[in-house]
Amino acid sequence: MARVVTKDDCLAEIKRFFKYYMAYCQSPDPDAVREVLASTYSINDKVRKAGYPSFFDSDEFLTIKAIRNYAIHQAEIYNNARALPLLSEVPVEADLGILCLIPQDVIEAICESANSEGRVAIKKSCVYYKNHVDIYPCIFNFGVQLFLYTERNGLDVSTIEYLEFKNSIEFERKHNLPHHVEGGFRLPHGGDINEFIENSLHSIEERNDLQNSLYSEEDGMFTFKGAS
């Protein structure tokens, strides 16, 4: 007889997601994203079995599900975590500083293996460039959806990673800022975005080193060290 999935099982997976998500944001390891994808899939499986609402109406979840299924059952996704430069001679406008780039041909293969619902979701929730597709906005927005879901369903947890995410949400609420992002970036003074991706992005290690030298961090919030 199958064991009944409980609230505690759901809480355990939610803790795991935010742990893996925060680790991924700091990690250059291509495999780090697989943990996030797998945990997302598992969260949906557990909450629906425990009687909570599922995420099947979320484009972000459907996208992650399609990418996860391809990565687990078919082939590598060859994802590459990159970062926009914190200091740049070229002005850059963006709502996210990290990109998770997958080659365009891999995304096409994922779409071919997905159902029509998954293909539509991928187009809506990811950012397409010439040679790559950025899936990080999708991952970020699912994290926001999950946090708001935990509030609505009494599934909040008290881990460091969850509380850091909560601090960001509360800051946005206080300053009337949106929680979700569009993703992508702009070069307001002109320039080729695709060339910028190929030649001007930083590694995650470079981003972390520069961020640590320029900013102090407390409870997931960063303050410029030069500010009074």
Image: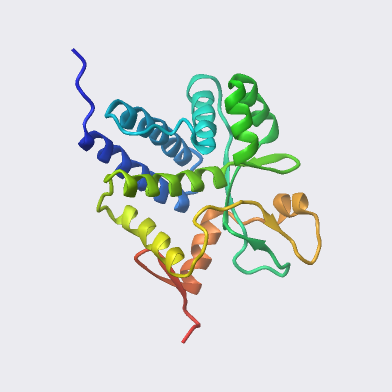
Q: Nearest the camera: 2 or 25?
A: 2
Residue 171, located in which quarter of the rendered image? bottom left
**Viewed as shown, does residue 30 lie left or right of 105?**
left
Task: Please name whichever residue, 36 or 151, is drawn nearer the observer in this view of the structure.
Answer: 151
**157 displayed left or right of 39:** left
Residue 225 x, y percent position in the rendering: 47, 79
Query: Can residue 102 be seen in the rendering of this structure?
Result: no
The answer to whether 75 is drawn above or below residue 86 in the figure is above
The colour scheme used to paint the residues is rainbow
- Rendered position, 164 above or below 45: below
Determine which quarter of the picture holds residue 41: top left
Q: The N terminus is located in which quarter?
A: top left
Q: Position of residue 211 (x, y in %)?
A: 50, 67
Quadrant assignment, res 123: top right
Give percent across and percent down for residue 69: 50, 24
Vertical arrangement, residue 122 with respect to residue 70, above or below = below
Q: Residue at x 62, y 62 (%)?
A: 85
Question: What residue occupies the far bottom of the structure in this picture?
Answer: 228
